[in-house]
Image (cartoon, helix red, strand yellow):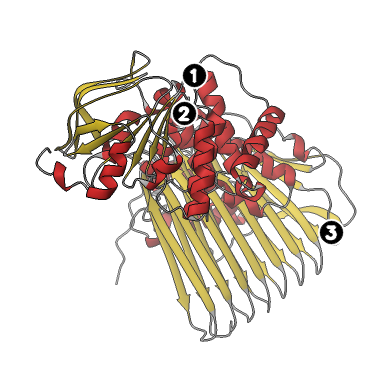
């Protein structure tokens, strides 16, 4: 599914990711943990193609297709989704208009027909119910005036509607209280599947109690410095990241 | 002391020949001979150089007046052609239409003087009872227009004025008197398709509790300037002036307004929004003057603009001048670029860059149209804005 090989990324001329190699097979959820400044968010932006995150070496493919040559919207149409650590407010653009535009743009790029307004309305309502997204939230401009928790729920709502193949969750637990964490995690778990993959980026172990990963990787100093099963996350929670200081 | 005689440009000299032999035509000729056309040296024209735009005299007119949109099929249409004016559609009771000589207009500035000078006649609309049908003032390429609108107490009129020539000089002068508790709603559309020069001036007086609402959409031209002067003369008089400009290529559009609060309890609401790309230039000058007598004035002015490309230019001059001590006045002015982070967010969701930009600009600009009560006109203006945005996107 997602294959990253010896990836190097610079931001403003400074090397942040320095030879990162990682493979997430279809059907698996991998967690990336690491201290602040390890390059976790840089990795998610480089994979999704944000300006200013310059890939200076290595490869990244999704189902064998080169991601790095594609524009951000083309990567999205290939099924790559990023749940943002800090979702943006888009004033003046109603949430439903935004989502229907995004869904139809992706479908168009894949050569599929547009979803009709009634079909979209039904789909959006069905998904909203499951995630506790209220009709009021869907009518408002996207994320405008939303609390931190509402914005994260809206990210997962978008993810469920767009039905991507590979999902990157960047610090999805930050800003969530324990009840919201449960709702969001259930929403995420419902999107797991044999032909889908997920990369869960988190600083803390607690999210992984709810979204159980198949593998856990430690990112420090721009490289994967350790990998293991779910027990690695527990060990990190107990011991911290100090022992990777030198590895970086 | 003898003043050095002004040396007229060849364009100005050529223009002198173009005025009709009316009193106002003579006055305009005399004014140009004495002062020339306004240039950058005139403070209120520092970003809009009329002399340079008319450097070859009166340009050849081209294009069409445009079709009346479906939403205005019930309107009474006044067509202004270079050689006269015509009427189309039904006229309701309570609207009297006359023509009169175009008389010189004192102290109203160079645009008003030019427009009065070019107009062979002035058309007078006297409103003695509220009108359900809108009145459309449609300017044909190269046509001058001079219209006086008088609303008697308690009456109401919707006025739509359009200037859509692709080339040529079109001038407009609107003198509007809004009577006690009367309301004039004006919708203006200007699109000079990069080639036309459009100079339009509105001079508005609002009596006690009267209302002047004006919402305009400009796409600019070789040079387009819409100047509005509003005197809130009576107590409790109010005005709402909204404008949007969407400019590309070498288009130039100038929205200049001056509102004078002369009586207490007046209210002004101004909202201007623009998006400018390529080498286009948008100009906003807005002055609100609150005289000493105008206590408890409530005036707000906002101008916000987006630069969509490097070579574009936006010039803004907001001004508040307040002599009363018990007033609420505020103004805001911002010029910025589209938010890169918002753009990336939208693209990550699969929306192509051009479409994402169009959505953001549309969201930014269209709240100017929220003040349009006429549903059809609101849809018409929003649709024109969207077409412009989609043109950018393709």
Of residues B370 and A48, the one drawn nearer to the viewer in this rendering: A48
Image position of B326 (left or right of B310):
right
Q: Which residue was labeled with disc 2?
A: B350
User: In which quarter of the view is residue B178 placed?
Assistant: bottom right
Residue B82 percent across, percent down from the top left:
63, 38
Q: Determine whether B249 is above or below A171 in the image.
A: above
Q: Secondary structure at mark 1?
A: helix
Identify which residue is drawn at 49% across, 28% down. Answer: A192
> What distance separates the C-alpha of mark 1 from that of mark 2?
9 Å
> Chain ID for label 2?
B
Q: Position of residue B217 (x, y in %)?
A: 57, 45
Give the mark toward the camera: 3 or 2. 2
The one nearer the camera, B299 or A232, is A232
The chain letter for the residue carrying disc 3 is: B
Q: Are marks 1 and 2 in contact (CB under 8 Å)?
A: yes
Dot 3 falls on a residue whose secondary structure is loop
Q: Which residue is mark 1?
A: A109
In the depicted structure, whether residue A69 falls above or below residue B390: above
Residue B130's tag is 3
Q: Is residue A177 visible?
A: yes
| Camera-nearest residue between B332 and B123 | B332
Check chain identity for marks 3 and 2: say if they share one. Answer: yes
Quarter containing the N terminus of chain B: bottom left
Given residues A117 and A135, the one toward you in this image is A135
């Amino acid at each position: 599914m997602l294959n990253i090989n010896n990836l190097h990324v610079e931001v403003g001329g400074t090397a942040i990711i320095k030879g990162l190699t990682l493979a997430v097979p279809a059907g698996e959820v991998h967690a990336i943990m690491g201290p602040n400044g390890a390059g976790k968010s840089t990795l998610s932006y480089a994979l999704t193609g944000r300006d200013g995150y310059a890939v200076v070496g290595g490869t990244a493919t999704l189902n064998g297709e080169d991601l790095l040559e594609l524009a951000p919207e083309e990567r999205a149409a290939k099924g790559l989704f990023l749940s943002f650590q800090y979702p943006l407010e888009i004033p003046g653009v109603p949430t439903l208009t935004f989502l229907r535009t995004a869904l139809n743009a992706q479908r168009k790029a894949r050569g599929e027909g547009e979803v009709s307004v009634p079909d979209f309305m039904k789909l959006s309502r069905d998904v909203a119910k499951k995630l506790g997204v209220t009709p009021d939230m869907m009518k408002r401009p996207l994320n405008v005036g939303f609390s931190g928790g509402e914005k994260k729920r809206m990210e997962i709502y978008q993810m469920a509607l767009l039905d991507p193949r590979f999902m990157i969750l960047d610090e999805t637990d930050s800003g969530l209280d324990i009840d919201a964490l449960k709702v969001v995690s259930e929403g995420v778990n419902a999107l797991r599947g044999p032909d889908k993959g997920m990369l869960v980026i988190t600083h803390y172990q607690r999210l992984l109690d709810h979204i159980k990963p198949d593998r856990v990787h430690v990112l420090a100093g721009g490289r994967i410095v350790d990998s293991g099963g779910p027990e690695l996350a527990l060990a990190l929670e107990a011991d911290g990241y100090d022992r990777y200081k030198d590895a970086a | 002391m003898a003043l050095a005689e002004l040396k007229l440009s060849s364009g100005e000299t050529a223009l002198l020949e173009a005025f009709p032999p009316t009193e106002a035509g003579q006055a305009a000729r005399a004014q140009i001979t004495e002062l020339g056309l306004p240039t950058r040296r005139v403070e209120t024209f520092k970003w809009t150089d009329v002399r340079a735009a008319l450097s070859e005299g009166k340009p050849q007119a081209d294009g069409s007046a445009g079709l009346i949109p479906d939403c205005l099929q019930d309107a009474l249409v006044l067509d202004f052609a270079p050689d006269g004016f015509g009427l189309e559609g039904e006229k309701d009771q309570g609207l009297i239409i006359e023509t009169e000589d175009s008389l010189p207009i004192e102290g109203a500035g160079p645009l008003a003087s030019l427009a009065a000078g070019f107009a062979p006649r002035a058309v007078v609309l006297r409103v003695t009872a509220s009108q359900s049908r809108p009145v459309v003032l449609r300017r044909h390429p190269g046509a001058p227009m001079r219209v006086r609108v008088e609303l008697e107490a308690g009456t109401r009129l919707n006025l739509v004025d359009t200037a859509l020539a692709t080339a040529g000089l079109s001038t407009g002068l609107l003198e509007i008197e809004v009577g006690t508790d009367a309301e004039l709603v004006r919708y203006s559309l200007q699109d000079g398709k990069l080639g036309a020069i459009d100079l339009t001036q509105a001079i508005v007086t609002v009596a006690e509790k009267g209302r002047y609402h004006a919402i305009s959409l400009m796409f600019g031209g070789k040079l387009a300037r819409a100047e509005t002067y509003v005197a809130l003369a009576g107590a409790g008089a109010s005005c709402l002036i909204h404008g949007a400009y969407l400019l590309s290529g070498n288009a130039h559009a100038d929205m200049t307004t001056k509102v004078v609060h002369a009586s207490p309890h007046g209210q002004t609401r101004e909202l201007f929004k623009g998006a400018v790309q390529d080498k286009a230039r948008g100009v906003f000058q807005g002055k609100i003057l609150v005289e000493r007598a105008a206590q408890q004035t409530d005036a707000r002015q906002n101008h916000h603009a987006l630069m969509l490309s490097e070579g574009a230019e936006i010039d803004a001059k907001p001004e508040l001048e307040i002599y009363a001590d018990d007033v609420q006045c505020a103004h805001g002015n911002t010029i910025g670029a589209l938010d890169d982070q918002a753009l990336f967010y939208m693209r990550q969701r699969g929306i192509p860059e051009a479409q994402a930009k169009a959505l953001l600009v549309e969201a930014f600009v269209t709240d100017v149209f929220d003040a349009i009560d006429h549903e059809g006109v609101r849809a018409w203006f929003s649709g024109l804005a969207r077409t412009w945005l989609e043109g950018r996107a393709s």
